[in-house]
Image (spheres, rainbow, N blue to C red):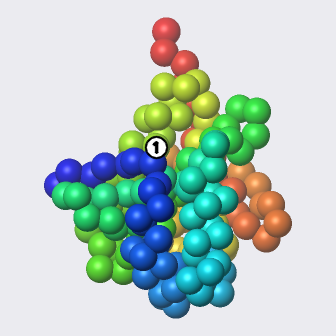
């Protein structure tokens, strides 16, 4: 299984809309997006000078997006939003490994935020060594501290 993380492109709008308009995907995030809101999200979060999100592909097919951006001075926020047909295949764990490795290479902690009801996200965070550390705006915050190599 080849997982790729790449910059978003304008041509991702259709696949991104399929993702963000799906009520199951958006259950813990927001109200499902219409096409206009999807295009705004793509421009503001994916195509901006400092992107907040990046496309995720499996074997060349769009499967969703990952979150990777500054959280605070010492941390980056990571996460993933995947199409339902890719749930349960280990992609979220694999993407978490890739994103935490990138954060570590940059000397940064990694943070995952989620609503308390997101059992799967919390399970993955704990499985990957993240520690619950705070609540912020109704979200639970999990942190994986960067380990300096001696």
Where 147 sits versus 64, above or below? above
Tell me the residue at 48%/40% (across/down): 100
On screen, residue 141 versus residue 55, left or right, reads right
On screen, residue 22 versus residue 56, left or right, reads right
Q: Which residue matches tag 1?
A: 99
Which structural element holds mark 1?
helix
Which residue of the protein is positioned furthest toward the bottom in this rendering? 23
| Closer-to-camera residue (26/74) | 26
Where 93 sits versus 26, above or below? above
**Where residue 91 sits: x, y (%)?**
32, 60
Q: Badge 1: few (under 14), some or many (20 or more) residues near its Cα, within 10 Å?
A: many
**Where residue 83 sits: x, y (%)?**
38, 76
Tell me the residue at 47%/34% (across/down): 102
Where 129 sits versus 148, above or below? below
**Where residue 75 sits: x, y (%)?**
67, 38
On screen, residue 110 versus residue 4, left or right, reads right
Which residue of the protein is positioned furthest toward the right in this rendering? 137
Indicate the quadrant containing the N terminus: top left, top right, bottom left or bottom right: bottom left
Which residue of the protein is positioned furthest toward the top in this rendering? 150
Is residue 7 visible to us here?
yes
Where 105 sits versus 9, above or below? above
Tell me the residue at 40%/48% (across/down): 6
Is residue 131 visible to us here?
no
Tell me the residue at 38%/48% (across/down): 5
On screen, residue 44 versus residue 85, left or right, reads right
Residue 14, located in which quarter of the rendered image? bottom left
| Closer-to-camera residue (127/26) | 26
């Amino acid at each position: 299984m080849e997982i790729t993380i790449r910059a978003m492109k304008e041509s991702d709008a259709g696949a991104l809309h399929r993702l963000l308009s799906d009520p199951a995907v958006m259950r813990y995030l927001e109200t499902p997006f219409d096409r206009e809101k999807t295009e705004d999200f793509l421009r503001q979060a994916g195509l901006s000078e400092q992107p907040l999100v990046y496309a995720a592909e499996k074997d060349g097919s769009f499967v969703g997006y990952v979150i990777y951006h500054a959280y605070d001075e010492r941390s980056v926020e990571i996460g993933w939003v995947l199409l339902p047909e890719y749930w349960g295949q280990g992609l979220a764990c694999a993407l978490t490994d890739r994103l935490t490795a990138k954060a570590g290479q940059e000397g940064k902690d990694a943070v995952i935020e989620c609503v308390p009801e997101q059992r799967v996200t919390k399970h993955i965070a704990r499985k990957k060594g993240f520690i619950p550390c705070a609540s912020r705006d109704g979200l639970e915050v999990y942190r994986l501290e960067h380990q300096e190599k001696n």
